[in-house]
Image: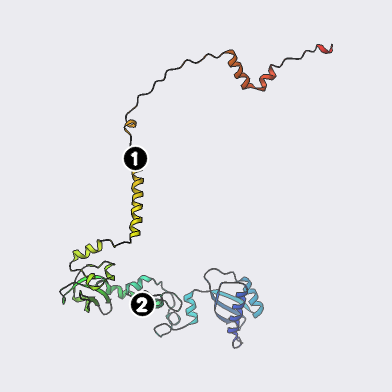
């Protein structure tokens, strides 16, 4: 005989209430009954290890069954709960994926996707598993494609253009000319790549962004961007301090002319030592021996007084 109807919801509510009373930082996901309701298995997620031994005792006393708590990851939680993705279909992890493959942000960059957490994250809050499906094909198409921001020369256009967008699957690139017009050209019509526009130039208008020669593009790329006056002042002060410290160390380590020339050894004349008199030696002996000297020179008492 299985668990009664609605027992799963009541068990989850009971487990959540007990966890709150014990101040356990855990999220109860699902519950499952096995062995005709004699064993109850709770699945939960937590950021760190949780000591739930007291929780198991209280649940066993309340449900009169064997209690098991299994900690799962956020991807496994989405698999257990089920749901639908932004494509409108059932989640891949709940339908056919058996083993999770690692997903990185590099795969999204290789596919020229918008780096938005809302677009790239799945129901579990992690990167979507579908980013790995076509990653190899995108990398193969990108080998013959110009990069975004590249200065190119096309066969149908006389002046160089800048690539502002590209579609790797269709093998087309969106370019902008000096007048600001947008054109869609296939990768095969791009004759050569002259260089790459500097990052600062990509934020400017079309007339200031384009360079007619590769030498001009390289000069703009090598030219440092304009900095704020306060940044220049701070850097100038740091350079001055470093220069001052370097000059100070150089002066400290440089040998002086007097020190470089060898100095002849100074001959000191041996001063005649004063002769120690008896009084001087007696005073030193008194100071050295102290009380021992006084005891040894104490006058002896005569023993004639008792006779």
**Residue 250 placement, left or right of 297:** left
Q: Are marks 2 and 1 in contact (CB under 8 Å)?
A: no
Q: Quadrant of the N terminus?
A: bottom right
Disc number for residue 251: 1
Answer above or below: position of 250 versus 258. Answer: below
Disc number for residue 133: 2
* Percent position of residue 140, x then y: 28, 73
User: How dense is the environment of label 1, judged by Cα within 10 Å: few (below 14), some, or many (20 and up)?
Assistant: few
Q: Quadrant of the C terminus?
A: top right
**Residue 117 placement, left or right of 183:** right
Q: Which sits in the foreground, 199 or 88?
A: 199
Tell me which corner region of the image, top left, top right, bottom left or bottom right, holds residue 14.
bottom right
The residue that appears at 33% across and 51% down in the rendered structure is 239
**Residue 71 placement, left or right of 224:** right
* Percent position of residue 277, x then y: 57, 13
The residue that appears at 37% across and 76% down in the rendered structure is 131
The residues tagged by marks 2 and 1 sit, at their Cα atoms, a distance apart of 66 Å
Answer whether residue 64 is visible to the viewer in this image.
Answer: no
Tell me which corner region of the image, top left, top right, bottom left or bottom right, holds residue 222.
bottom left
| Callout 1 secondary element | helix
- Number of on-image labels: 2
**Residue 251 placement, left or right of 96:** left
User: Which callout, 2 or 1, points at the residue further toward the start of the chain?
Assistant: 2
Q: Which sits in the foreground, 79 or 13?
A: 13
The residue that appears at 33% across and 41% down in the rendered structure is 250
Tell me which corner region of the image, top left, top right, bottom left or bottom right, holds residue 196.
bottom left
Q: Which sits in the foreground, 23 or 220?
A: 220
| Callout 2 secondary element | loop
* Percent position of residue 164, x then y: 26, 74
Disc number for residue 295: none
The residue that appears at 67% across and 77% down in the rendered structure is 61
User: How dense is the environment of label 2, judged by Cα within 10 Å: few (below 14), some, or many (20 and up)?
Assistant: few
């Amino acid at each position: 005989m299985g668990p009664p109807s609605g027992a799963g919801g009541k068990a989850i509510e009971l487990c959540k209430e007990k966890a709150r009373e014990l101040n356990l930082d855990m999220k109860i996901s699902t519950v499952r009954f096995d062995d005709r309701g004699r064993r109850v298995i709770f699945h939960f997620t937590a950021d760190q290890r949780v000591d739930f031994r007291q929780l198991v005792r209280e649940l066993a006393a309340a449900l009169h069954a064997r209690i098991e708590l299994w900690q799962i990851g956020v991807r496994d939680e989405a698999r257990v709960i089920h749901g639908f993705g932004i494509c409108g279909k059932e989640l891949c992890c709940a339908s056919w994926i058996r083993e999770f493959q690692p997903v990185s942000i590099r795969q999204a960059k290789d596919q020229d996707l918008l780096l938005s957490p809302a677009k790239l994250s799945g129901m579990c809050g992690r990167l979507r598993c579908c980013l790995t499906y076509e990653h190899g094909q995108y990398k193969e198409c990108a080998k013959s494609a110009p990069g975004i921001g590249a200065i190119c020369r096309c066969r149908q256009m006389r002046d160089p253009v800048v690539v502002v967008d590209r579609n790797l699957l269709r093998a087309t690139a969106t370019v902008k000319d000096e007048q600001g017009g947008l054109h869609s050209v296939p990768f095969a019509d791009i004759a050569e790549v002259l260089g790459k526009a500097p990052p600062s130039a990509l934020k400017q208008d079309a007339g200031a962004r384009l360079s007619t020669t590769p030498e001009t593009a390289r000069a703009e790329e090598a030219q440092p961007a304009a900095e704020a006056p306060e940044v220049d002042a701070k850097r100038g002060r740091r350079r001055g301090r470093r220069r001052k410290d370097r000059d100070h160390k150089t002066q400290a380590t440089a040998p002086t002319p007097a020190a470089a020339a060898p100095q002849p050894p100074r001959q000191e004349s041996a001063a005649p030592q004063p002769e120690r008199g008896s009084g001087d030696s007696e005073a030193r002996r008194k100071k050295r021996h102290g009380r021992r000297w006084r005891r040894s020179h104490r006058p002896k008492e005569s023993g004639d007084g008792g006779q």
